[in-house]
Image (cartoon, rainbow, N blue to C red):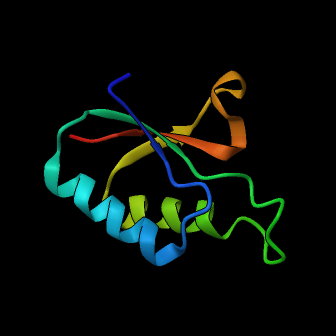
Amino acid sequence: MNGLLDLHGCSVEEAGNILNEILDEKASSHIRIIVGKGIHSSNGPVLRDFVKNFLIKNNIKFSQSKIQDGGEGALEVFIK
């Protein structure tokens, strides 16, 4: 794996800014992004859904991490 990015606890705006920076840099081809499961949010997994939608809009491949790597609270992201 090339990188780890922990967005857990960030606002949607902060996460968007960080993701845009990473896309501009294109330094890593594989990043594990920690987004949390949303269990402490009254509105469910807001950050996880935001990051997934961001990646889809930008045609970036991703998958849910294996359970030992964060499961529902993490995404494996593959940048071209």
- Picture residue at 65% right of the left edge, 26% below the top: 66
Left or right of residue 74, residue 17 in this image: left
Count of numbered badges drawn on the protein:
0
The image shows residue 76, relative to residue 68, as above or below, that is below
- Picture residue at 15% right of the left edge, 50% below the top: 25
Q: Position of residue 75 (x, y in %)?
A: 54, 42
Q: Position of residue 12 (x, y in %)?
A: 51, 74
Q: Position of residue 26 (x, y in %)?
A: 17, 45
- Picture residue at 36% right of the left edge, 67% below the top: 57
The image shows residue 11, relative to residue 4, as above or below, that is below
Q: Nearer the viewer, residue 69 or 14?
A: 14
Left or right of residue 28, residue 31 in this image: right
Q: Position of residue 55 (x, y in %)?
A: 40, 58
Q: Quarter-wise, where is residue 65 in the image?
A: top right
Left or right of residue 42, residue 19 in this image: left
- Picture residue at 54% right of the left edge, 73% below the top: 11
For the N terminus, the quadrant is top left
Left or right of residue 13, residue 35 in this image: right
For the C terminus, the quadrant is top left
